[in-house]
Amino acid sequence: MKPARIFLYVVAFLTFLVVAAFLTLRIWSDELTELAFVPSGKFEAQQPLEANAYDKSGMWFARPNTGVEDPARWQPVYAKGRQPASGVEDPPPPFAVFFVLPTSYLENKAWNASLGDAAANDRARLFVKGMASPFNQASEIWIPRYRQAAVGALLVDDQAANQALDAAYRDVEQAFVYFLDHADRNTPIVLAGHSQGSLHLLRLLASRIAGSPVEQRIAAVYAIGWPISLEHDLPKLGLPACKTPDEAGCVASWVSFAEPAETAQMLKRYDTSPGFDGKPRGETPILCTNPITGRMGGVAPAKDNRGTLVPKPDLNSGDLVPGMVPARCNSKGILLIGMPPDMGPAVLPGNNYHVYDIPLFWRNLQLDVAHRVSVWAKSYH
């Protein structure tokens, strides 16, 4: 069977699982949801990885000089007849990307995925192609494997869930140390991730990067798909929010819902969880970067969306479609994208477009990354 065809089946199976999972979230009680997705067994402590674990190329989904085709370098094309008029764009200066993938372990058999979990790894490779590819202009892309916490660990706030997230973070932190030691030290760094991956990036910022010399090398942070409290999270990250498209050394983030948006479930978990200052986030505003304009907050029409990555019906590939989706940050900090666009079967209940946070604004994100790196190079180097 051809790799592309295998990729298709993985996509189809993944979307089915995601939709089924979140239908359960919506239709049945919290107790049934936890039964379905939260591991029932005790947390099993994860043994530390070997000190040189990330020397091995197999510990990375992407890294320089592996001799293997890198799915993060994939470049989609515009749908036929939809190529927008644009001038010549200068390429950005060299930069290195450290990207942390979202949760691909959907089982409830353990609190953490094993590194050899075939299903989780197949889904992770899918995410590399769909979510890391907007960063494909980088001179280096590093995407580590890690023993991610089960999806159920993100649904509850208890000791086992926190231990699972801590274990996953330790792997990410170890990979980041290796990245710092081996990436080109003369280039700026872009940190990026989605969902659980963004949570681990934010923890890196708060506990390891803020106030350190590394902070000066950060051209931008894209912590997408994880809500960031302006009051209880952002001040501890060391870097400010990206308020304009011409800023570098800042944090961008958004969580996407079509309208009418049913955000109560997400906000319930957000409101009661602690921020990086240790206090409950409460009903504090969420950081909302408008991915079309690159500004904090505001409204942008669909015509300014340079390209949404839309999968074809057979899932064999995807096309960029400009002018498809608008973006508006509401008063709470939720990114609203208007009427539900047809992106495929992985839209979650409540018009939650979490799975598509990055594809919805694929081309604008690619341009934003290049511009902020260029701004950093002119301002800091």
Image: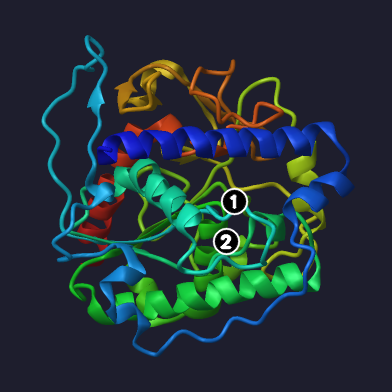
The front one of 370 and 65 is 65
Residue 295 in picture, x, y percent from top left: 46, 39
The front one of 116 and 312 is 116
Residue 175 in picture, x, y percent from top left: 39, 75
Q: Is residue 33 left or right of residue 345?
A: right
Q: Residues within 10 Å of mark 2 (few under 14, many from 20)?
A: many
Helix, strand or loop at mark 1: loop
- Which residue carries the number 1 mark? 226
Give me the C-alpha separation between circle 1 and circle 2: 7 Å
Q: Residue at x 46, y 84 (%)?
A: 49
Task: Identify which amino acid the numbered label 1 is placed on.
Answer: Trp
Q: Is residue 159 left or right of residue 209?
A: right
Q: Is residue 244 above or below residue 228?
A: above
Point out the image quarter for the N terminus: top left
Q: Which mark is residue 112?
A: none
Label 2 near label 1: C-beta < 8 Å? Answer: yes
Q: Tell me which corner region of the image, top left, top right, bottom left or bottom right, holds residue 9.
A: top left
Q: Tell me which corner region of the image, top left, top right, bottom left or bottom right, holds residue 329.
A: top right
Q: How many marks?
A: 2
**Residue 162 visible in this rendered orientation of the protein:** yes
Q: Is residue 311 above or below residue 25?
A: above
Q: Residue at x 79, y 73 (%)?
A: 159
Task: Identify which amino acid the numbered label 2 is placed on.
Answer: Leu
Q: Tell me which corner region of the image, top left, top right, bottom left or bottom right, holds residue 145.
A: bottom left
N-term-proximal mark, 1 vs 2: 2
Farthest residue, direction top: 81
Residue 165 in picture, x, y percent from top left: 63, 69
Q: Which mark is residue 199?
A: 2
Q: Is residue 379 above or below residue 286?
A: below
Farthest residue, direction bottom: 51
